[in-house]
Amino acid sequence: MIPLPTSRVLVAGIGNIFLADDAFGPEVLAALLARPLPEGVDAADFGIRGMDLAYRLLDGYDAAVLVDAVPRGGTPGTLYVLDLDGLDGTERGFVQAVPEAHGMDPVKVIAMARDLARWEDLAFPHVVLVGCEPRIRMRGDEPDVICGLSDPVRAAVDEAVKLVDSVVEDLLLRTGEQLPG
């Protein structure tokens, strides 16, 4: 009997803690890291370090779950699960996928990491986004910072942890069933 491969999943918190609801990803990661993670799961708060995340995505993971504030026009605090597989940035007209030094656009980071994976002939993980509709959207050029989540986004953190757990469990099951090709 051929043993199933060990699945590896990365859970990545994304967001700027000085821009109100943009801190959703780091807040969820803090809650996740307060307890043991399943075998094969790594979790890290990447904040706005897009280059770090891009290279980490190439570190042999079968899947990655990004956790971020995601403005989609819904009610603040609404949670979303978006499959980002196949997303390469061309849908939004990017010519070059270069992450910013003081911000992180997950689409650009994923596009750059996919390019790096192709260039280096590396496998690229299946990517899923768990997002929350923000109430407060800051651009970063405001004169003051706002630390802390708005009430509806703060209330969504515990449910987001449960949702991330569910998504990770599903990804571990799906990737664990695949036999080496």
Image: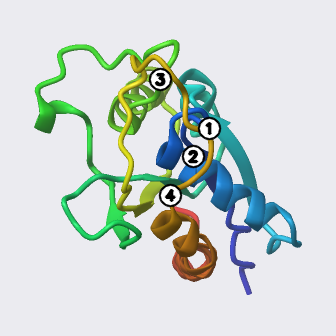
Q: Earlier in the sequence, mark 4 or mark 2?
A: 2
The residue identified by callout 2 is 23
Identify which residue, 174 or 132, lies in the foreground: 132
Q: Height in image: 120 above or below 57?
A: above
Q: Is residue 105 left or right of residue 12?
A: left
Q: Earlier in the sequence, mark 4 or mark 3?
A: 3
* Residue contact at pointers 2 and 1, CB within 8 angstroms: yes
Disc 4 or disc 1, which is closer to the eye? 4
Q: Height in image: 127 above or below 173?
A: above
The residue identified by callout 1 is 17
Q: Amino acid at mark 4?
A: Ser
* Residue 66, visible in the rendered structure: yes
* Residue contact at pointers 4 and 3, CB within 8 angstroms: no
Identify which residue, 162 or 134, lies in the foreground: 134
Disc 4 or disc 2, which is closer to the eye? 4
Question: Neighbour class for label 1 at 10 Å: few (<14), some, many (≥20)?
Answer: many
Mark-to-mark CA distance, 4 and 3? 20 Å
* Residue contact at pointers 1 and 3, CB within 8 angstroms: no
The residue identified by callout 4 is 150
Q: Secondary structure at mark 4?
A: loop
Which dot marks residue 66? none
Q: Earlier in the sequence, mark 2 or mark 1?
A: 1
Mark-to-mark CA distance, 2 and 3? 12 Å
Identify which residue, 26 or 115, lies in the foreground: 26
Q: Residue at x 52, y 43 (%)?
A: 20
Mark-to-mark CA distance, 4 and 1? 12 Å
